[in-house]
Amino acid sequence: MFSLPKICCLLLTTFLAAALPSSRADEPTTADARFEKIARDCIEQYLALKPEWATTLGEHRFDARLNDRTHAGIDAEVALAERALQALAAVPTAELSAVNRVDAEILKNNLESTVFELRTVREWQWNPLQYNVGNAIYLLLSREFAPLPERLRNVKGRLEAVPAAVAAAKANLQNPPVVHTETAIVQNAGTLRLVREELNAFLEKAPELKTAIAPVQAAAVAALEDYGKWLKEDLLPRSKGDFRLGDEKFRQRLRYSLESDLSKEEILRRAEAELKKAQAEMYATARPLYRKYFPDRDDPGATPYPESLKAVCKAVLDKLAETRPDNDTIVGLAKTDLKATTDFVRAHRLVSVPDEPVEVVVMPEFQRGFAVAYCDAPGALAKNEATFYAISPTPADWPPARRTSFFKEYNDYMLQDLTIHEAMPGHYLQLTLANRFQAPTLVRGVWTSGMFMEGWATYAEQFMAAAGYGGPEVKMEQLKMRLRLILNAILDQKIHTAGMTEKEAIDLMMNEGFQEEGEAFGKWRRANLSATQLSTYFVGNAEVNDLVRDYRAKHGGDQADVQAMHDRILSFGSAAPRYLRALLGM
């Protein structure tokens, strides 16, 4: 077991002892003032304990440090959460303002989730992905929030801490699932390349720092090389753990991650019903395209429905997949698509378009192996930083057939839908507007609802297709993505609680969702690595659609101003729909 030096432990104990609650005579007396102080103190202490998280949020006072991944650091985080929960329990929530009442619920949910994750799930003991320091370094290089020399001095501090992070991994990791260790090996190779090679391009721009940084860079490289060897030769052979979370833990994590009252049984029931509806809608969209592309073939309606549905939809999707990018063209095409989607949103007044910058970039290698694309928006504390829409090329070790399969999945039409989801009017737009939200505390900016964010992005795909963007071809891919988000929820719980096998999962995705083999294989691995996250898409989408339906019913039905409605829904930050209902007076 590793622990902090005694002096650090003494300072940390003193720091936490001075935290919540307090009995000083000058403590605030109103419920709102008490809650706001608890929230401010809690966030301030979390930022100090989790410096990498602070960087992602745009708070740069702790940029020279890495998270403390030792037992002492984990114990300190649990202690802080438990102290804050104790203080929060003493606040009469009924006396809080509407905004603070919502934020108190959000804070309580996330603190309870922290204790549950660290004390019950305990991923720090079995998930080597938690020890990847690549992002902590990359964030200081990729975002120009300060002059490069200042950022490089903080990189130096983080490089100095790399050997300790590797030591903590070796001390803590016991019996990981093999898929986690395999992914960690790939990501560590990317982190090693970042530190050993890609960092040098930045040092060339600040040569005065080369001499000071060279020794710690070399030490970090040595530590990461040693870690990679340990992962392959020591940890991998003994990675016999079960990646399945199990029913009890899955239910608890689902409640925390969704902030929804839906049980996993109700989620499954709704998902299976929606699967049939989405397939029927795809069939209706595909039939005219089938006649267009295959005028010499028989009328698809001549075949019984279930067979004709799959035959027609697959034929049309295969035809669309013939027009596709490759590793060299996908980023440029995404840039073109981003301009087109932005122009369309403005022209049709679907939602207000922000002016903050967004850049399409190639996903860094150390982050690959989990998702195909992501949106990296500035944190709530950042100032004038860009949003990155990152796309992952195919891994270098993929055989040609799998690489072809991947780009058939992410063809030109699907890439347009992906751009809607990740950028405009999906994640980039929503997160940018969320960062404009202001409240008495930063709770809603620090602890965002992934369920709402994914719900909005998938809902954005729907309303863009409904408005005619990209014609029936893009609508086909949007419906394919809808099938994917529905299947995500089914896969998520059946894999982690019902023993679904890889073959069963891939068969379901390919036969019911028309996914390519490469995409299905990647989703299987992603489901192995992230219990409950895949459910956020379907549940978020369902709850955002329900919210929009009820908003329209209250504000003029189909005559409601679409842009005003969307702007209003997005004006409260990234909060779960259950809280948005209260704030919208619904």
Image (cartoon, rainbow, N blue to C red):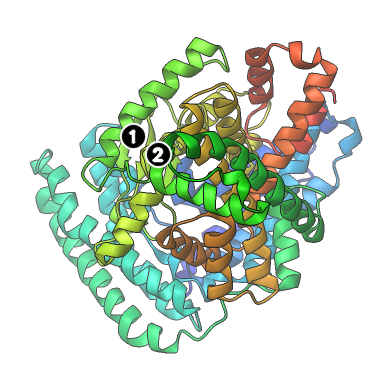
Q: Could you tell whether 542 is left or right of 181 in the image?
A: right
Q: Residue at x 41, y 50 (%)?
A: 409
Res. 520 visible in picture: yes
Are the two marked residues, 2 and 1, in contact with CB atoms closer than 8 angstroms?
A: yes
Q: Which residue is mark 1?
A: 334
Q: Amino acid at mark 1?
A: Ala
Can you tell which quarter of the image residue 394 is in?
Answer: bottom left
As rendered, which of 380 and 561 lies closer to the eye? 561
- Residue 495, horizontal then vertical, whole percent: 63, 70
Q: Residue at x 53, y 53 (%)?
A: 311
Q: Residue at x 36, y 55 (%)?
A: 406
Q: Which residue is mark 2?
A: 415
In this picture, is 287 found above or below 177? Answer: above
- Residue 210, horizontal then vertical, whole percent: 11, 49
Q: Amino acid at mark 2?
A: Leu
Q: How many angstroms separate mark 2 from mark 1 (CA)?
A: 7 Å
In the picture, the disc for residue 41 is none
- Camera-side mark, 2 or 1: 2
Q: Could you tell whether 327 is left or right of 576 in the image?
A: left
As rendered, which of 471 and 552 lies closer to the eye? 471
Can you tell which quarter of the image residue 577 is in?
Answer: top right
As rendered, which of 549 and 191 lies closer to the eye? 549
Going from N to C along the chain, the mark reached first, 2 or 1, is 1
Judging from the image, what secondary structure is the residue with disc 1 in? helix
- Residue 80, horizontal then vertical, whole percent: 65, 56
Res. 17 visible in picture: no
In this picture, is 6 found above or below 352? Answer: below
Q: Residues within 10 Å of mark 1 (few under 14, many from 20)?
A: many
Q: Residue at x 69, y 64 (%)?
A: 116
Counting labels gives: 2
Judging from the image, what secondary structure is the residue with disc 2 in? helix
